[in-house]
Image (cartoon, grey):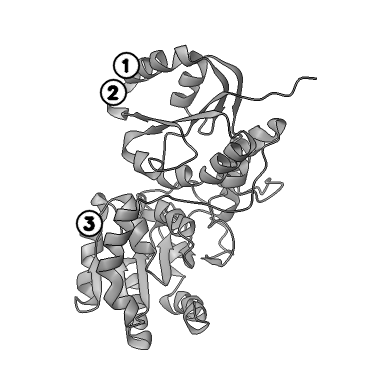
Amino acid sequence: MTTFIPDKTLFIRMSSIGDIVLTTPMLRSFKKKFPQSRVDFIVRKEFAELLRYNPHIDALYEFNAQTGLAGLRKLCDELRPVEYDLLVDAHNSLRSRYIRRRVPARKKVRINKRVIQRFFLVKLKWQVYRDNVHVADRYFEPLQPFGVTNDGEGLELHIPEEMKKRIADEFGKLKRERITIAALCPSAKHYTKRWLKEYYVELAEKLIRNYNAYIVILGGPEDQSYCEDIRRLIGEERTLNVAGEVSLLQSAAILDHCDVVLTNDTGLMHIAVARKRKVVAIFGSTVKEFGFFPYGENNTVVEHPDLSCRPCTHIGLHKCPKQHFRCMKDITPDTVFDVVRQYVDNGL
């Protein structure tokens, strides 16, 4: 039997931040297995910087979602003449399926998103997941027939050296003084993924009081006001809010200088893991079975495991369906501080 060796491969993962970062072990391992293969990748324009400097990608196609179906048609028309050997749909959405149908390839594979298992767990609270496979590992499943295996080196995010140096210069004084720097990522797109604002404030105050810590608050442009409220409540002297002021890669470069990262179940959590930070993640309405817990070791998920109403969603909701929001309210600042303190006291 002839071994299948793809000369030209197309990967599709349109969004979002965390999902894209989680593809990086697959891309790296694929390129190790097939170093001669041309690797192209389709991603939404607003997330393209996460992959722009990835050395395992030969061509990055940035799709503008504002162009709608016409934009998808144009993209497919551009890709059709390439005649790919392998198409890997790591998204399995309406848009990616449209591309999958219209762009020819000798072989086409897609990720299994475990939609049925997720439905039973969210809607009926039936635990039918046979295993607790992380999404980063699920990406490898459609590639198993081609002998692509996980190299075990974890997530990665490539930042230009000039950007890293510029951020390092700004944080150099704090690092030279050996000040503990804690990053807060307090926002999220959906309400039920957000630990309480006042809890983040109390946690930051504990870190400042007990460790003379410096607090950096991160988030996107849509989080700017929310994060600024937290900064004002903590106090201006030992806090810096950069939410909405820096790009995703600049946020990643800032995280390089943070000793510990306190975060909700968001894309910044995965970016922090990719930069090899110590991560304390607070999970409310979502659970680890969905596969989006911090990847690798030396990370902690703080959650309320005994609530019968969890999970109420796999992506987050705009309000608590039960109106009590115990999944977040019952996780106190003292509980999270005890986890963070173990990292700090053990030299991080």
Viewed as shown, does residue 100 lie left or right of 187?
Answer: right
Circle 2 is placed at which residue position?
A: 67
Q: Is residue 96 above or below residue 56?
A: above
- 109 or 275: nearer the viewer: 275
Query: Which comes sooner in the sequence, label 3 or label 1?
Result: 1
Q: How far apart are marks 1 and 2 (CA)?
A: 6 Å
- 203 or 240: nearer the viewer: 240
Q: Which residue in the rendered view is the most extreme toward the right?
A: 1
- Residue at 41% from the left image edge and 38% from the top image edge: 15
Q: Is disc 1 surrounded by few (<14), some (14 to 19) or many (20+) residues within 10 Å?
A: few
Helix, strand or loop under label 2: helix
Q: Is disc 3 surrounded by few (<14), some (14 to 19) or many (20+) residues within 10 Å?
A: some
Q: Could you tell me if the residues under marks 3 and 1 are in contact, i.e. CB atoms within 8 Å?
A: no
The type of residue carrying mark 1 is Ala
Helix, strand or loop under label 3: helix
Circle 3 is placed at which residue position?
A: 224
Q: Residue 70 carries which label?
A: 1
Q: Could you tell me if the residues under marks 1 and 2 are in contact, i.e. CB atoms within 8 Å?
A: yes
Q: Report if residue 211 is visible in the image.
A: yes
Q: Where is residue 273 in the image (x, y as percent from the top left)?
A: 48, 58
Q: Distance between the residues labelled 3 and 1?
A: 33 Å
Query: Which comes sooner in the sequence, label 3 or label 2?
Result: 2
- 144 or 117: nearer the viewer: 144
- Residue at 37% from the left image edge and 79% from the top image edge: 180
Q: In this view, does 40 lie above or below 283?
A: above
Identify the image quadrant of residue 244: bottom left
Q: Where is residue 96 in the image (x, y as percent from the top left)?
A: 47, 26
